[in-house]
Amino acid sequence: MTAYDDHQGPAPAGGAEEPATEHGMTRRQLLRHAGWFGGAVVLTVAGGEVISHVAGTRDAAAAAAGAAGSPNGALRFVQVSDSHIGFQGPANTDVVGSFTEAVHQVNGLGFRPDFVMHSGDLTHLSTAGQFDQVRQMLAGLRTDRVFTVPGEHDSIGDAGRAYRQAFGKGTLGDGWYSFDTHGVHFVALVNTLRLEKLGHLGTEQIDFVRKDLSGLPSDTPVVVFSHIPLFAMYPKWGWSTDDALKVIALLRRFSSVTCLNGHVHQLFTKTEGNITFHSATTTAYPLPKPGRAPAPTPQVVPARQLKDALGIRTVGYRRGDQQLAIKDERLA
Ligand SMILES: [Fe+2]
Ligand SMILES: [Fe+2]
C-alpha cells in the first residue's frame, strides 16, 4: 500500500491564481523554472569553502550500504524528484522512460525501502492526465509508503488543487504534514504555492511547524522535505525560500537536522551548524549550475551523458547515529 492510496479526499481551497501561458504555465513559473548538472558530484560548502567529491563513495556509501538490508531496525528510504511527467523537449524526449527506469532502480536496490519520497515536480503541467500517470507509476514502487511534496509545476493555475486531489488526503493546510518512523521525525513542507521571486511557506505553515516540533526532545533526528531549497542556493533564480529562516530558527535546538529538497535538478550539499541541506537530482532533465547560464532552462546534453545527470537518492539511518547516510546514484 502506498501513502496516497487513501489520499483521495477533497482538496482544500487554494490561493491566488495567475494566467497561464500557451504552455500551460504562468509566465512567472516559466521564468523561475527552467539550468548544470552535477551528475554524481556533490559540492559541499562548509566554512565558506566549496569542496567537491564524488557522491556515493567512502563513508556515505559504506554507511548507506551498511544500513541497507540491516535487520536491526535501521531506516532506509529513497528520495526521487522532479520527474516532470508531461515534459516535452530536446533535453529529454522520454521523461516517462526515465522515470520508469528510476522506479526499476529503486525496486532493484536489493532492499525494500521503508518509504519513497517524491520531492515535487511530479508533473510538468499539472494536468489531470499527468497526475494520473505519475500516480500509476509511483504505484509500481516496491515500498510500504509513498510520500510527496508538490513542486511549482504541480500547482499551475489552480494553487495546488489538482495536486491535493491526487496526493493530499490526510495532509493539513495546503498539503503539509509530519510523521515519525524509526525514531526520526519527518516534516513535509509546501513552499511552491505563493511564488513571487522565491519559495514561500507562509504564517499558517510556520505555525504548524512550531506546534509540530514543540513537544519533541532536542535529540530527536529531524528530516525536513520541501521542493524548493530552504537555504539560499541561488536566490537570483528563485532557488531559495523567502521565509525559511523562521523555520530554520525552530530547528536550531535539535542535534541533527537534515533538509532534503528538489527543484534545482542537481546535487548540492551545504551544512550550517546543526543543519545539513541536500539538493537532489532529477529523473527528467538537467538544469544549469547556478549562474552558469542566463536562466535556469532545461539543458540539452549528449544522449550518452543524460543518464549521468539523472538519478535517485538512498538514505539510511541507524538509531543513535548523529547523521543520516546519504547516497546519490546515477540512473542505471
Ligand atoms: Fe523541477
Ligand atoms: Fe521545481
Image (spheres, grey):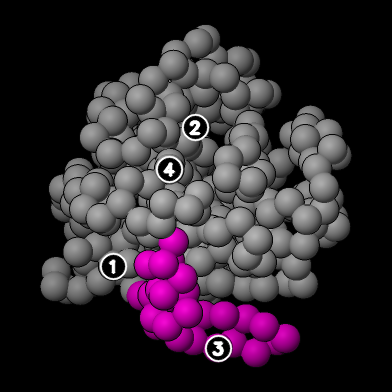
Mark 4 vs mark 2, CA separation in Å: 28 Å
Q: Nearer the viewer, residue 63 or 3?
A: 63
Helix, strand or loop at label 1? It is strand
Counting residues from the start of the chain, the first of labels 3 and 4 encountered is 3
- Which residue matches tag 1? 330
- Which residue matches tag 4? 114
Mark 4 vs mark 1, CA separation in Å: 21 Å
- The magenta stretch is 40-67
Q: Any magenta on residue 63?
A: yes
- The amino acid marked with disc number 4 is Asp
Helix, strand or loop at label 4? It is loop
- Which residue matches tag 3? 51
- The amino acid marked with disc number 2 is Ser
Q: Is residue 273 above or below residue 261?
A: below
In the rendered image, which quarter contains the N terminus?
top left
Locate residue 212, reporting x and y percent.
77, 35
Helix, strand or loop at label 2? It is loop
Counting residues from the start of the chain, the first of labels 1 and 2 encountered is 2
Q: Is residue 317 above or below residue 43?
A: above
Counting residues from the start of the chain, the first of labels 4 and 1 encountered is 4
Q: Nearer the viewer, residue 34 or 102?
A: 102
Q: Residues within 10 Å of mark 3 (few under 14, many from 20)?
A: few
